[in-house]
Structure formats: structure tokens, C-alpha cells
């Protein structure tokens, strides 16, 4: 790994940070998930409604019954408000 990007033979804190941010798969994954979440959140409410999840399934070509969708949301919806927020989405994605 090439850390010394400005060739002064010292690895500065900034260079270290840049390298770490580039390498941290968790960060990349989170950013990607946030993008996906935003795409799914059609009305920009910051939460995914049942209808928004359904639309995403259709868009991805996943055939899901109303019952299957209901179960999926119930499982992800930790605070039982009927919507999936970003934290619930992350947990669901990570299979927690
Ligand atoms: Ca929404
Ligand atoms: Ca919720």
C-alpha cells in the first residue's frame, strides 16, 4: 500500500486518514446503502413506506406477495411505525 503520497518519506496523519477512508469497506457499504435508501425513498420523507419498498421490489424484478412484503417490513421495522428508516434499513441489510 502506497501511503506516502507526497513523497516526503513520512506518512502524515492526513495521508493515513485518506488511505483508511479509501480502504474501509464498512464506510463504502454505508454510503452505498444510503444511496440505495435515497433512491427508494421517492417522496423524500426519510423513511420507506410499504409502497416504496414494493416499488423497489418491482423495479428489481423481484416478485413478492403482499404477505411476503408485509413480513419483510415487519421484520425490519424495529419501532413498529410501519415505515423503514435509514437505521432499520441498515440493520435489515446487514441481516441483524
Ligand atoms: Ca418515503
Ligand atoms: Ca420504523
Image (cartoon, helix red, strand yellow):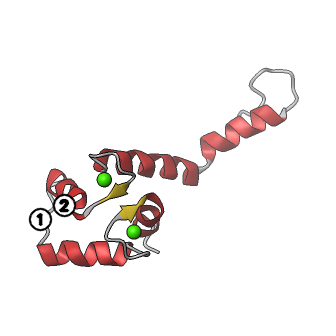
Q: Nearer the viewer, residue 7 or 21?
A: 21
Q: Residues within 10 Å of mark 1 (few under 14, many from 20)?
A: few
Q: Nearer the viewer, residue 42 or 12?
A: 42
Left or right of 65 on screen, residue 1: right
At x 11%, y 65%, the residue is: 63
Pair 2/1: label in front: 2
- In the figure, 49 relative to 72: above or below? above
Q: How many marks?
A: 2
At x 36%, y 64%, the residue is: 84
Quadrant of the rendered structure where residue 70 is?
bottom left
Does any portion of residue 27 appear in the rendered image? yes
Q: Residues within 10 Å of mark 2 (few under 14, many from 20)?
A: many
- In the figure, 67 relative to 26: above or below? below
At x 39%, y 52%, the residue is: 46
Q: CA distance from mark 2 to mark 1?
A: 9 Å
On the rendered image, what quadrant is the N terminus found in? top right
- In the figure, 88 relative to 34: above or below? below
Give the number of the disc on residue 54.
Answer: 2
Expressed as whole percent of the image width and height from the top left, the position of residue 78 reads 43, 75
At x 23%, y 56%, the residue is: 52
Check disc 2 and report its element: helix, strand or loop: helix
**Sequence order check: which comes first, mark 2 or mark 1?**
2
Instruction: Confirm or deny contact between disc 2 and disc 1 (CB under 8 A).
Output: no
Left or right of 36 on screen, residue 21: right
Give the number of the disc on residue 63.
Answer: 1
Give the number of the disc on residue 93.
Answer: none
Q: Is mark 2 within 8 Å of ligand 1?
A: no
Quadrant position of ligand 2: bottom left
- In the figure, 49 relative to 79: above or below? above
Expressed as whole percent of the image width and height from the top left, the position of residue 69 reads 20, 71
Quadrant of the rendered structure where residue 15 is?
top right
Amino acid at each position: 500500500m502506497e501511503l506516502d503520497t507526497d513523497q516526503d518519506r513520512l506518512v502524515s496523519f492526513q495521508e493515513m486518514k485518506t488511505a483508511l477512508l479509501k480502504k474501509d469497506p464498512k464506510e463504502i457499504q454505508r454510503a452505498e446503502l444510503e444511496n440505495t435508501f435515497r433512491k427508494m425513498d421517492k417522496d423524500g420523507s426519510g423513511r420507506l413506506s410499504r409502497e416504496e419498498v414494493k416499488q423497489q421490489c418491482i423495479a428489481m424484478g423481484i416478485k413478492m406477495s403482499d404477505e411476503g412484503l408485509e413480513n419483510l417490513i415487519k421484520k425490519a421495522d424495529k419501532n413498529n411505525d410501519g415505515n423503514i428508516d435509514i437505521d432499520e434499513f441498515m440493520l435489515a441489510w446487514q441481516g441483524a
